[in-house]
Image: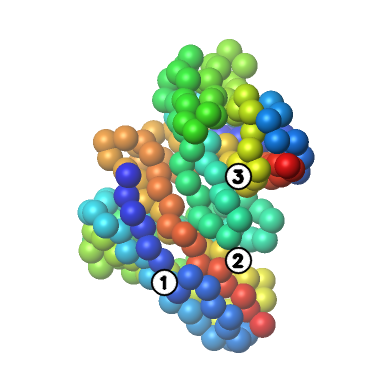
Amino acid sequence: GNSVTQMEGPVTLSEEAFLTINCTYTATGYPSLFWYVQYPGEGLQLLLKATKADDKGSNKGFEATYRKETTSFHLEKGSVQVSDSAVYFCALKRNQGGKLIFGQGTELSVKP
Amino acid sequence: SAVISQKPSRDICQRGTSLTIQCQVDSQVTMMFWYRQQPGQSLTLIATANQGSEATYESGFVIDKFPISRPNLTFSTLTVSNMSPEDSSIYLCSVSGTPTNEQYFGPGTRLTVT
């Protein structure tokens, strides 16, 4: 079946450190891939997406590249800020009417 | 993107009672979804609600416990019936954008059952 696996958290970094949150998926065909962010006490916000192999999604300094060969969609940011502290969810969707399948979420804590 | 609002934003309820959560979208959408997020967990899809048809429930969720209404293309309700402390969760409404494959979420309803 379709599934998403993320690296376990919590991840604790100092401000301006480099961030990588690993995400791998299992799916048939060519799903669309997403990263969502959930700030404390809030709902989910779409952070970025990629719809086909080798696509790079980017937003707010975050990037992720759709790697078909490794079935991965790792989230990266070159220099994190305290305001990036949140829970990050990787997700996939197989088609327009399909279900959004989430990973377990990775909590990021950035210290000043 | 769609703007989604939910009411109430939070509530504390007694065991055995029911709570109806409302979801309003600022544009017409075909597909609406209801998710549950238990404390410290990821999101679990409860059901998909399309206007004019019965909601489709995921494994482990039943209509008697989580009845859903979808009277039009901008509104839906989820009722959590006969609540127990295990129902304490955040309940999120979500809509699917077209023609993109993006999905947007409301701010959630934080429910505590005592």
* The C terminus of chain B: image quadrant: bottom right
Residue placed under numbered mark 1 in the picture: B7
Amino acid type of disc 3?
Answer: Ser
Labelled disc at residue A83: 3
Cβ–Cβ below 8 Å for labels 3 and 1? no
Amino acid type of disc 2?
Answer: Ser
- In front of the other: label 2 or label 1? 1
Disc with the residue nearer the chain's start (2 vs 1) = 1
What is the CA distance from the residue labelled 2 to the residue labelled 1? 15 Å
Kindly identify the residue that appears in the image at 59 percent across and 21 percent down. Answer: A71
Q: Is residue B83 visible?
A: yes
Label 2 resides on the chain identified as: B
Q: Is residue A19 visible?
A: no
Q: Is residue B23 above or below residue A23?
A: below
- Most distant residue in the front direction: A112
Amino acid type of disc 1?
Answer: Lys
Picture quadrant where residue A78 is located? top right
| Towards the viewer: A37 or A95 | A37
Residue placed under numbered mark 2 in the picture: B89
- In front of the other: label 3 or label 2? 3
Give how far across and how far down residue B33 sits, in percent: 41, 55
